[in-house]
Amino acid sequence: MNGLLSVVRRLGRAVIDGVWRLGFATRFFGLLLLYSGQSLRRVHLTIREVYFSGVLSLLIIIVSGLFVGMVLGLQGYETLQRFGSGDALGVLVALSLTRELGPVVAALLFASRAGSAVTAEIGLMKATEQLKAMDMMAVNPIARVVAPRFWGGVISMPLLAALFSAMGVFGGWLIGVVLIGVDEGAFWSQMQAAVDFRFDVVNGVIKSVVFGAAVALIAVFEGYDCTPTAEGVSRAITRTVVSSALAILALDFVLTSFMFRGQS
Amino acid sequence: MSRTTLDLWVGFFVVIGMAALLFLSLKVGNLASANFSESYVLKAQFDNIGGLKVRAPVKSAGVVVGRVTNIGFDTGSYRAEVTFVVDTRFQFPRDTIATILTSGLLGEQYLGLEPGGDVEMLKSGEAVQITQSAVVLEKLIGQFLFNKAAEAPAN
């Protein structure tokens, strides 16, 4: 009886804790937006964060984009040529990259490369009481530390996703046209006939902006909310990567079902 | 505040990000060619549209001149009503024939326009009068079997 009671009690505490955190996260997001005006006026802070989360992620994004595109080229050709339509390789590579793989894989990489770094930085600032010190000096830590990191992520993400897709298409071209010998004209012209600017490219950009906001918010919140100890910071980083990945995939499903339901 | 190397890197990052977006919209997508700046609306009624979909191309002599924007069902005549836009650069005579065709054996279906000889041109909002429905493979096979059965001597 007592054992059962303690299980129920623990479950209840976990649920209440979760709801509490969610409420705090929402209030935190509200404050973040409220103080964004202040921090965006000091634009060099945001530019610095674009450097740390965007520029330093360039290499991993470019290399993985290239490899994903090359794998798509090999696997896509293998399947398409069974139906005698190897020429449609460009369509396959471009559509899967602009619609899904570009935003999603770039966001997953971004979460593990830049999101975790942001959480670690803010978490360590909290553990070493730098955030409290700022508060003492009447410097708002949300405006000075959190908001620039959030906006840096939101700005970097669509650019990184576009770069990922472009590199992927280039990788697909490298394998399809240069290595396998798909006709170059058919590769590009079928791609251009099938990929619609508004429907495919813009929707991909919208997706990447949403993912960027989600990843950046999770990263700064987990850092700000972490237990200020070494263990707490490490847990917060793990939570950032895990919940960003889950959020990206769940949001991707929701956005896809809005954007591409039953058309073409 | 002075310029720093960090600014240079961020600028470089934004430039190649924008270049990638430009590449996606111009080279991968078809923003340059299929953006109908000015277009007019036409309608056509069909007995059967087969697998025609919204956003399917409208072609004349194989050249894309427009896009299908809406497919509806007319309860008055029990026929499918297809609405499509055509670029204003391309004007078609009033006795143009609209046909639903398939590109290749298993390709997507599109709307074909075959211009007639009328001197008056179709205006925006008007309907194409002469239409030809999509070829339904099942009906063709059924007809073929029926003809075969009629030819064969009864026994």
Image: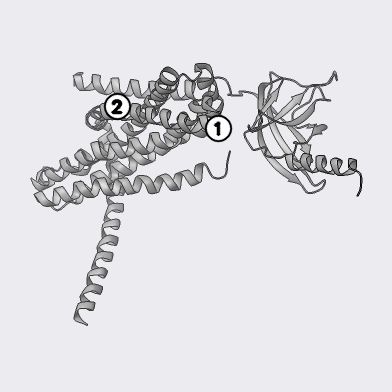
Quadrant of the rendered image containing residue A193: top right
Identify the residue position indicated by label 2 in the image: A63
Where is residue A98? Give x, y as percent: 44, 32
Q: Is residue A160 visible?
A: yes
Cβ–Cβ under 8 Å for marks 1 and 2: no
Please tell me which residue lies in front, B119 or A165.
Answer: A165
**Element assignment for label 2:** helix
Judged left or right of residue A26, residue B70 is: right
On-image quarter of the N terminus of chain A: bottom left
A252 w.r.t. A18: above or below: above
Farthest left residue in view: A128
Which numbered disc covers residue A83?
1
Which numbered disc covers residue B63?
none
In which chain is the residue bearing label 2? A
Give amino acid for label 2: Val
A25 w.r.t. A111: above or below: below
How many other residues sit within 10 Å of disc 1, few (<14), some (14-19) or many (≥20)? few
